[in-house]
Image (tube, grey):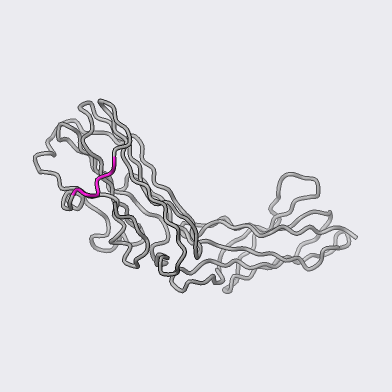
Amino acid sequence: MRISIAAPALAGALVLGAVAVPTAAFAATAKPVITKIASPSFTLGLHGRITLGVTVTAKDAKGIKAIYAEPYPLALSKQEHAVPTLADLRADASDDLLKVKSRTATTQTAGISETENITKPSQLPPNLLAGTWGVAVLVVANDGSSTFNAQATTFNWKRADTLSSKVSATRVHKGGKLTVTGRLNRVNWDKRVYQGYGAQTARLEFRKTGAKTWTTVKLVKSSRTGALSATVKDSTSGSWRYVYGGNSTSGAASSAQTWVGLK
């Protein structure tokens, strides 16, 4: 099973399954049902361990013969031939068939999983592949009936973010002003560096000394360079931090917390 993100041409190379199925196998009989499917998401910086794969469970009264799957980035779905079709999954060789993990007389669970240790810049995927991916699935029953779903599930490839924070003072008078600055950076896989991530909303949070929960004090939008800044009135001792929730292409991040006491 070829699962690799080492090449920039990943959109065409990351194929988890394909099959050549005779036309006669698609007779008008009761169709198998996909009951469960999962594919892991990941957030990646400049290095780290990631897991790629898909696991599918299907059932049919006559039993399941085989399960096949192929992932594709939704960011490229508007391009011609970017979304796998039934014909695509039927056209290729069967050497990428999902491996059977378990089966009964009426069900089968099949999948593939591979963990990669990203240690070199050349192993990083291109930025355009960050975001939501779909998984096309083809299930063939023992009686030749089949079910095809072009988007049976989705998962995400996310670019890692880092977030910092700094307070203008660690001691203030009660009701005095306190400025909390910070910076939101996102990894650029193409350039292999972290860069400022602008126009993103982070939460400035506060936790009173002795409390267990954080409270959002302000929503702060990052500048073009990723800079964050907010000025607040501090009425009690406690800790401050910034939190970014992430989005479909970027992972969540939290800054270190800094305690500020009253004079």
Q: Image quarter for residue 73?
A: bottom left
Q: Quadrant of residue 169?
A: bottom right
The residue segment tinted magenta is 94-99
Residue at 34 percent across and 66 percent down: it is 7
**Residue drawn at 31 percent across, 48 percent down:** 151
In the picture provided, is 250 more to the left or to the right than 210? left
- x and y percentages locating residue 86 in the rendered image: 20, 48
Viewer-closest of 135 and 52 = 52
Rendering coords of residue 154 (x, y %): 38, 49
- 237 w.r.t. 137: above or below: below
Q: Residue at x 41, y 50 (%)?
A: 155
Which residue is most to the left? 24
Image point (51%, 72%), residue name: 193
Q: Is residue 130 above or below residue 1?
A: below
> Height in image: 255 above or below 40?
below
Instruction: Name the image quarter holding residue 110.
Output: top left
Quarter of the image where the C terminus is located: bottom right
Q: Position of residue 43 (x, y in %)?
A: 49, 56
User: In the rendered image of this protein, does residue 145 appear above or below residue 22?
Assistant: above
Task: Indicate whether residue 67 is drawn in magenta.
Answer: no
Q: Count up the numbered dots.
A: 0
Within the magenta stretch, is there residue 95? Answer: yes
Where residue 20 sits in the image (x, y, percent)? 15, 48
